[in-house]
Each structure stands twice: as C-alpha cells, then as structure tokens.
Image: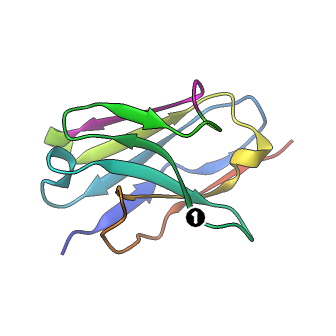
Amino acid sequence: QVQLVESGGGLVQPGESLRLSCTASGTIFSTYWMAWHRQAPGKQREWVAAISDDGSTRYSGDVQGRFTVSKSSAESTMYLQMNDLKPDDSAVYYCNTMPQTLGWGQGTQVTVSS
C-alpha cells in the first residue's frame, strides 16, 4: 500500500515562502497525476497544484503565479514551492493522486500570520 508523507509546513508571515515535500513509496510519481490539496478549518479540501506523469502542471486560480509544483521521480518526492504566502493560504496541506485515490497522509500544517 502506498504511503504518503508530507513535510515542510510551518508558521510564516505574509509574503514569506515555504517549500513542502511529499514522499511516497512505489512509482506513483511517474505513473499518475499527483496533486497538492489543502484544507482550511471549516472548509472542504481543495486541490491547489497538480503535476502529471510527464511533468505538465496545473494550478488553481488562488495560487497561480505564487506556487510551483515539481517532482523528482527518482527520489519519489513531490515539492510545492509557495511564495508570497497569504493568510488565506493557511491550511493543512496534503498530497495525493488527482483525482484522489489513495488514503490521506497526516498532512503538514501551514500557518500564515503576522
């Protein structure tokens, strides 16, 4: 069973940056569309950035131009570089396939606050 492990979250001020990492067992990064999803308190989980098996990327309108998704299939790791963070970006961030087919990991908390 594929296990997903997210890391890299933290507390930052508005305008600062963070880089999240997602590691997974197996070869899913070279096989499936993968995505970063996030869930803020009281809100539904939503996807924010996705990357295909061949490296094509897509972003939600909220993060377009600020977030960059990348991956290293050799390292079985996916990244999310988040720049110019805003308070509305505060959420628990998860990785999964897109659409979601795997069990959710524990996620990593991102808090943007002054």
Task: Judge from the rendering whether residue 14 lies leftward or rightward of residue 19; answer left or right.
Answer: right
Q: Which residue is mark 1?
A: 45
Q: Quadrant of the C terminus?
A: top right
Kindly state the secondary structure of the residue where label 1 is placed: loop
In the rendered image, the residue lying farthest to the right is 114
Instruction: Count the numbered circles shown.
Output: 1
For residue 109, what is the image quadrant? bottom right
Q: Position of residue 31 (x, y in %)?
A: 15, 49
| Magenta stretch, overall SS | strand
Q: Position of residue 90 (x, y in %)?
A: 70, 52
* Magenta stretch contains residue 73: no
Highlighted range, magenta: 64-72
- Judging depth in this view, the residue of 96 and 21 nearest the camera is 96
Task: Judge from the rendering whether residue 79 lies leftward or rightward of residue 77; answer left or right.
Answer: right
Q: Position of residue 37 (x, y in %)?
A: 50, 55
Q: Position of residue 39 (x, y in %)?
A: 61, 62
- Judging depth in this view, the residue of 100 and 105 nearest the camera is 100
Q: Residue at x 69, y 35 (%)?
A: 85
Task: Judge from the rendering whether residue 28 lies leftward or rightward of residue 7; answer left or right.
Answer: left
For residue 2, what is the image quadrant? bottom left
Q: Quadrant of the N terminus?
A: bottom left
In the rendered image, the residue lying farthest to the top is 65
For residue 95, what is the image quadrant? bottom left
Q: Residue at x 65, y 38 (%)?
A: 62
Q: Residue at x 42, y 57 (%)?
A: 6
* Magenta stretch contains residue 69: yes
Q: Residue at x 55, y 40 (%)?
A: 60
Q: Amino acid at mark 1?
A: Arg
